[in-house]
């Protein structure tokens, strides 16, 4: 690869960003809109930054059709901090919550929540290495649970909820870190949605929280101030200095998605990309996808050869031609290609061609 060439980055995060957004941000780096300062240097209390964050929120609301009775917050701490904030704020009555364990991150969310209340595993697919999504029904959840938590897309194991589980009148909380803005979602079915930015939206450092207003304000008085959603909701994400530059890039990505036709059009592109790769895996004699077909993710596609040495050779040779970060997560091994929104179709085509050549050369 030449020093000025762009690679195809299949990382699970931080991931690729739209080239149009990067180029525009580069032009604005040292002097945003001719102001003579970068967004990184800008006061978060300035009218210029207020316009940036206000426009970003308005465009996210438009893209996701977020109802007026939901607050949008741009916070720090990644999805991991949400593992604590959710129980601290939502365990308000029975102190019970039910978690669906569909992978490593779901398990971490459950483990953290256990510190704060009576937390139960309502269903788990760990018995088959998280290669499927449990089929859920209302009876799987305790009638008095304060909320139900799911991880909508499972980055490490490549599974995805292809329908919103029926939790009846219970509050549904979803971690959508690795699939936000890749598909149309009925936000009204959820009490709270959170998503780290570094997969589909922006650089690491910002987490989006979409929360129904009637759920805000129930944190215990001893809850650390930063972990109380009410503080951030009342201050419009400006209680303290927010991750200004990440919010700026997120706002530019929101504009980009709107420019191509919104989430509906983005989803069509994502489906086409994923189908190309899944079809190549299905047609292969070398590669296999361990995930059940009906539960496969569009964003994170896992596949294996069954031979660690062959996997290592595949990863090294792919990297040499500009196809990088194809190694599976250290906890599961194998191979993984993350096809987030900004991954161009050309990247998927290049990967499929390489897979076919690699298989022919290593029979």
Image (cartoon, rainbow, N blue to C red):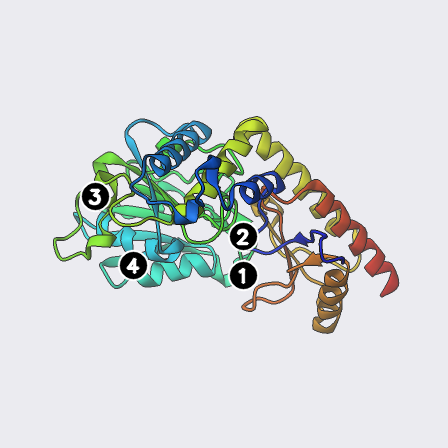
Residue ID at (81%, 50%):
353
Percent position (x, y) of residue 85? 28, 53
Residue 132 circle label:
2
Residue 230 circle label:
3
Tell me whether the residue at label 2 lies in contact with that at label 3, contact meaning CB atoms closer than 8 angstroms. Answer: no
Residue 128 circle label:
1
Mark in the foreground, 1 or 3:
3
Tell me whether the residue at label 4 lies in contact with that at label 1, contact meaning CB atoms closer than 8 angstroms. Answer: no
Q: Secondary structure at mark 1?
A: helix
- Residue under circle 4? 113
Mark in the foreground, 4 or 1:
4
Residue ID at (21%, 43%):
230
Percent position (x, y) of residue 80? 37, 58
Left or right: residue 307 versus residue 192 is right
N-terminal-most mark, 4 or 1: 4
Mark in the foreground, 4 or 3:
3
Left or right: residue 208 versus residue 305 is left
N-terminal-most mark, 4 or 3: 4
């Amino acid at each position: 690869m030449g020093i000025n060439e762009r690679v195809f980055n299949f990382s699970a995060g931080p991931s690729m960003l739209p080239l149009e957004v990067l180029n525009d941000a580069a032009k604005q780096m040292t002097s945003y809109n001719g102001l003579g300062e970068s967004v990184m240097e800008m006061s978060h209390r300035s009218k210029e930054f207020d316009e940036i964050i206000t426009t970003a929120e308005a465009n996210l609301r438009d893209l996701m059709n977020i109802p007026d009775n939901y607050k949008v917050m741009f916070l720090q701490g990644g999805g991991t901090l949400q593992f604590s904030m959710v129980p601290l704020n939502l365990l308000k009555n029975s102190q019970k919550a039910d978690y669906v364990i569909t992978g490593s991150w779901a398990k971490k969310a459950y483990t953290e929540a256990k510190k704060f209340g009576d937390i139960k595993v309502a269903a788990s697919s760990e018995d088959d290495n998280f290669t499927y999504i449990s089929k859920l029904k209302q009876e799987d959840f305790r009638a008095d649970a304060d909320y139900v938590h799911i991880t909508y897309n499972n980055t490490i194991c490549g599974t995805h909820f292809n329908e919103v589980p029926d939790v009846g009148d219970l509050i549904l909380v979803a971690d959508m870190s690795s699939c936000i803005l890749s598909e149309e979602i009925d936000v009204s079915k959820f009490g709270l949605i959170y998503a780290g930015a570094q997969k589909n939206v922006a650089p690491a450092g910002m987490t989006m929280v979409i929360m129904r207003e009637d759920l805000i304000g129930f944190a215990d008085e001893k809850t650390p101030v930063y972990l109380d959603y009410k503080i951030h909701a009342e201050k419009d994400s400006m209680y303290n200095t927010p991750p200004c530059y990440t919010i700026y890039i997120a706002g530019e990505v929101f504009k980009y998605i709107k420019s191509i036709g919104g989430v509906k059009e983005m989803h069509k592109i994502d489906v086409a990309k994923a189908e190309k790769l899944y079809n190549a895996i299905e047609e292969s004699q070398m590669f296999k996808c361990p995930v059940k077909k009906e539960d496969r993710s569009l964003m994170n596609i896992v596949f294996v050869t069954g031979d660690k040495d062959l996997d290592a050779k595949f990863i090294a040779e792919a990297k040499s031609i500009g196809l990088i970060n194809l190694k599976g997560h250290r906890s599961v091994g194998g191979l993984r290609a993350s096809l987030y929104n900004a991954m161009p179709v050309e990247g998927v085509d290049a990967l499929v061609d390489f897979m076919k050549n690699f298989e022919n050369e290593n029979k």
